[in-house]
Image (tube, grey):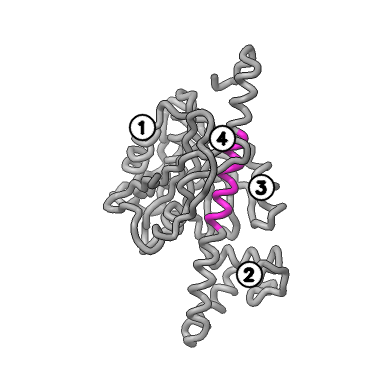
């Protein structure tokens, strides 16, 4: 079944889309749906890594002993109104399914994958969004509290990823731009829609910065074996970036740099799939416990 990728003028075809991962297994029991989102390019950037991750993401996820769960990928417009309109349409389209929603955004000043614990009820844009909106110090929803927290155990996700050698930290601040606003609106939607079982936003670093973290934390050298860092070696991310720039200007390592970038994108996509599977598995287990003990009612139910 082809995966739908919803974005303005994009159909999911192309070089990156043709490399989508495939999964195999029997059809899932129950009506579950995974939604994975990214954003298109914004500000001075000509591309957005999270758009690549959405296009590379598997069409289906397979849980051992459970079966296959379909995935819809959505590339959201980086606009406060348009992003939520796209996501809201998808959530309503799957209103008869139990939904696990994983949202991703680019955080180019971070070095690790960061699941977000909190969405602030605040929009305070440092730049205009793609439709020209410039919100300054205003509440997203004046009726609600200053923040909403995900019920996904982000500390467990951090521990699980770190055990697998994936650089990951928990974040308590999703920013005040469109990423945070869309996250807040998704958590607000979950409050009144019982079929939305999990909502989590994950910020992603730049590919080059992520490789720096791998090399620093795990001695990663691109061959999945511990080794001395090929660059960085105790230097800061900024110093490593300068080194890369100097190498590029000298005309050296261009081909390797492209290969490293694609490898990092693949690894980041794999990490998001791991997070999604963990959230999906937890949501399914919670559903089983709810059916086994119907007298127990969760706070959200």
Which region is colored magenta?
268-282
User: In this rendering, which labeled residue sits more in front, label 3 or label 2?
Assistant: 3
List the residue tagged with mark 2. 236
Q: Residue at x 52, y 55 (%)?
A: 269
- Mark positioned earlier in the residue sequence (4 or 2): 4
In the rendered image, residue 291, in percent from the top left (x then y), is placed at 60, 19
Distance (Cα) linking label 3 and label 2: 23 Å
- Mark positioned earlier in the residue sequence (3 or 4): 4
Q: Are marks 4 and 1 in contact (CB under 8 Å)?
A: no
Distance (Cα) linking label 4 and label 2: 32 Å
Which of these two is toward me, 134 or 94? 94
Q: Residue at x 48, y 26 (%)?
A: 195
Q: Residue at x 40, y 48 (%)?
A: 125
Quarter-wise, where is residue 279 in the image?
top right
User: In this rendering, which labeled residue sits more in front, label 3 or label 1?
Assistant: 1
Distance (Cα) linking label 4 and label 1: 22 Å
In the rendered view, tell whether residue 68 sits above or below residue 239.
Answer: above
Q: Secondary structure at mark 2?
A: loop
Q: Please state, as top left, top right, bottom left or bottom right, where the C terminus lies in the image.
A: top right
Distance (Cα) linking label 3 and label 4: 15 Å
List the residue tagged with mark 3. 158
Whether residue 45 is visible here, answered yes or no, is no
User: In this rendering, which labeled residue sits more in front, label 4 or label 2?
Assistant: 4
List the residue tagged with mark 4. 150
- Mark positioned earlier in the residue sequence (1 or 2): 1
211 drawn magenta: no
Horizontal side of residue 89 vs 210, given as left or right: left
List the residue tagged with mark 1. 93
Whether residue 104 is visible here, answered yes or no, is yes
- Mark positioned earlier in the residue sequence (3 or 1): 1
279 drawn magenta: yes
């Amino acid at each position: 079944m082809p995966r739908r990728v919803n974005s303005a003028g994009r159909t999911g075809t192309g070089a990156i889309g043709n490399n989508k991962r495939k999964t195999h297994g029997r059809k899932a029991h129950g009506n579950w749906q995974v939604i994975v989102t990214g954003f298109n390019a914004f500000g001075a950037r000509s591309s957005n890594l999270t758009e690549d991750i959405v296009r590379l993401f598997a069409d289906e996820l397979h849980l051992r002993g459970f079966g296959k769960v379909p995935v819809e990928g959505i590339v959201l417009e980086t606009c406060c109104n348009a992003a939520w309109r796209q996501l809201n349409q998808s959530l309503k389209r799957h209103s008869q399914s139990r939904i696990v929603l994983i949202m991703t955004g680019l955080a180019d000043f971070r070095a690790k994958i960061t699941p977000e614990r909190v969405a602030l009820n605040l929009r305070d844009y440092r730049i205009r969004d793609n439709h020209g909106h410039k919100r300054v110090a205003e509440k997203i929803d004046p009726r609600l509290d200053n923040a909403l927290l995900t019920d996904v155990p982000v500390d467990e996700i951090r521990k699980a990823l770190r055990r697998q050698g994936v650089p990951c930290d928990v974040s308590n601040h999703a920013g005040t731009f469109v990423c945070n606003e869309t996250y807040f609106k998704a958590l607000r939607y979950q409050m009144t829609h019982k079929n939305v079982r999990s909502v989590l936003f994950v910020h992603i670093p730049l590919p080059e910065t992520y490789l720096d973290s791998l090399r620093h934390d795990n001695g990663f050298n691109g061959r999945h074996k511990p080794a001395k860092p090929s660059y960085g070696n105790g230097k800061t991310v900024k110093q490593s970036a300068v080194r890369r720039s100097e190498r590029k200007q000298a005309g050296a390592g261009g081909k390797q740099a492209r290969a490293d970038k694609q490898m990092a994108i693949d690894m980041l996509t794999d990490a998001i799939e791991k997070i999604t599977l963990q959230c999906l598995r937890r949501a399914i287990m919670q559903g089983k416990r709810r059916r086994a003990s119907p007298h127990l009612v969760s706070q959200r139910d």
